[in-house]
Image (cartoon, rainbow, N blue to C red):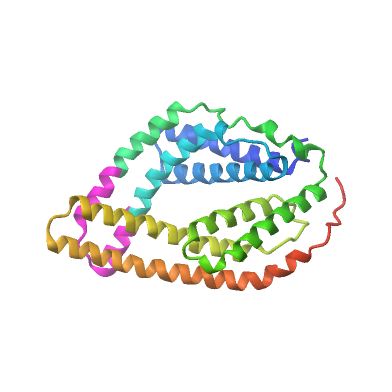
């Protein structure tokens, strides 16, 4: 039954990844364990949204424990990424930002302890949504794949309608596109709905754009709260300027990639019913 139910099969895989990385993080959270757990949660959440689109079953209240753990891990990731970007811009532009680096490093260490405690406090079997996907038990792969493609098309149409506000809605667009990618990757390889490699590239641009957004915000907060000297403030403003230029370039690349994709995925609206042999 699990092999037949496309969503449940993938849900169980991500549930296992989630539990493995909770166990790892109880001993010592690593950059990989934080990243892998967060990706697993994003996929599980996406599968629940997919199921909700079809069945209208509510899941958000029951997901609260996982969502809170995800946010806690996210705070650690924000400091990890910001420290990484800080070091890169310092090296590339010879900017003396040792005090800011120390601030990021100390907070990262504190958050590691917080993440470790949070992992200890969540039950390993927390993602108990296996029955949530029972609707798909009776669907053959062709039927489930067709439904997933139809729902993905609706998301793509939604993004098209809001294209002129791409910059303002970049983060929301990224979340919507992640759903499209996660959903379409559920479909058997024998069904070619859309080439996902360009979509993955677009998501990489938007993901790095988001990393810079967080880094710039964190730098501004630090400068406002802790910096008193004009020289240090000028250095941080230069750091923000350099990161802002990169962020702007990433958004331009993302918009250009979307323009390319829009031409390719327009025919998707005409996708006929799938002719997949039933298992």
Q: Is residue 41 visible?
A: yes
**Residue most extreme to the left:** 229
Which residue corresponds to the image point at 31% horizontal and 53% vertical from the top-left?
A: 218
User: Between residues 8 and 164, which one lies in front from this camera angle?
Assistant: 164
Quadrant placement of the N terminus: top right
Which residue corresponds to the image point at 64% horizontal and 44% vertical from the top-left?
A: 47
> Residue 3 vs residue 68: left or right?
right
Q: Position of residue 130 (x, y in %)?
A: 67, 32
Residue 241, compared with residue 219, is above or below; it is below
Q: Is residue 84 visible?
A: no
User: Between residues 27 and 168, which one lies in front from this camera angle?
Assistant: 168
Identify the magenta region.
83-107
Which residue corresponds to the image point at 81% horizontal and 49% vertical from the top-left?
A: 143
> Residue 176 vs residue 117: left or right?
right
Q: Does 85 appear in magenta?
A: yes
Which residue corresponds to the image point at 23% horizontal and 62% vertical from the top-left?
A: 236
Residue 10, compared with residue 185, is above or below; it is above
């Amino acid at each position: 039954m699990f092999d037949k139910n496309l969503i449940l099969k993938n849900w169980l895989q991500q549930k296992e990844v989630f539990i493995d990385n909770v166990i790892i993080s109880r001993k010592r959270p690593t950059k990989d364990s934080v990243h892998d757990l967060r990706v697993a949660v994003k996929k599980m959440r996406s599968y629940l949204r997919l199921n909700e689109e079809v069945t209208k079953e509510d899941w958000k209240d029951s997901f609260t424990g996982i969502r809170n753990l995800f946010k806690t891990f996210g705070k650690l990731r924000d400091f990890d990424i910001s420290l990484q970007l800080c070091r890169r811009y310092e090296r590339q532009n010879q900017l003396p930002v040792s005090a800011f680096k120390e601030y990021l490093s100390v907070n990262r260490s504190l958050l590691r302890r917080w993440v470790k405690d949070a992992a200890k406090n969540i039950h390993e079997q927390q993602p108990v949504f296996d029955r949530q996907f029972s609707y798909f038990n009776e669907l053959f792969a062709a039927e489930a794949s067709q439904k997933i493609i139809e729902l993905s098309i609706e998301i793509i149409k939604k993004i098209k309608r809001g294209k002129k506000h791409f910059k303002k809605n970049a983060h929301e667009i990224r979340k919507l596109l992640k759903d499209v990618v996660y959903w379409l990757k559920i479909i058997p390889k024998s069904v070619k709905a859309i080439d996902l490699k360009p979509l993955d590239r677009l998501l990489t641009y938007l993901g790095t754009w988001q990393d810079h957004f967080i880094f710039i915000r964190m730098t501004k907060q630090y400068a406002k709260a802790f910096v008193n000297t004009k020289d240090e403030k000028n250095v941080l403003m230069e750091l923000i300027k350099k990161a802002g230029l990169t962020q702007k370039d990433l958004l331009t690349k993302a918009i250009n990639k979307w323009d390319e994709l829009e031409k390719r995925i327009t025919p998707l609206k005409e996708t006929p019913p799938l002719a997949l042999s039933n298992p």
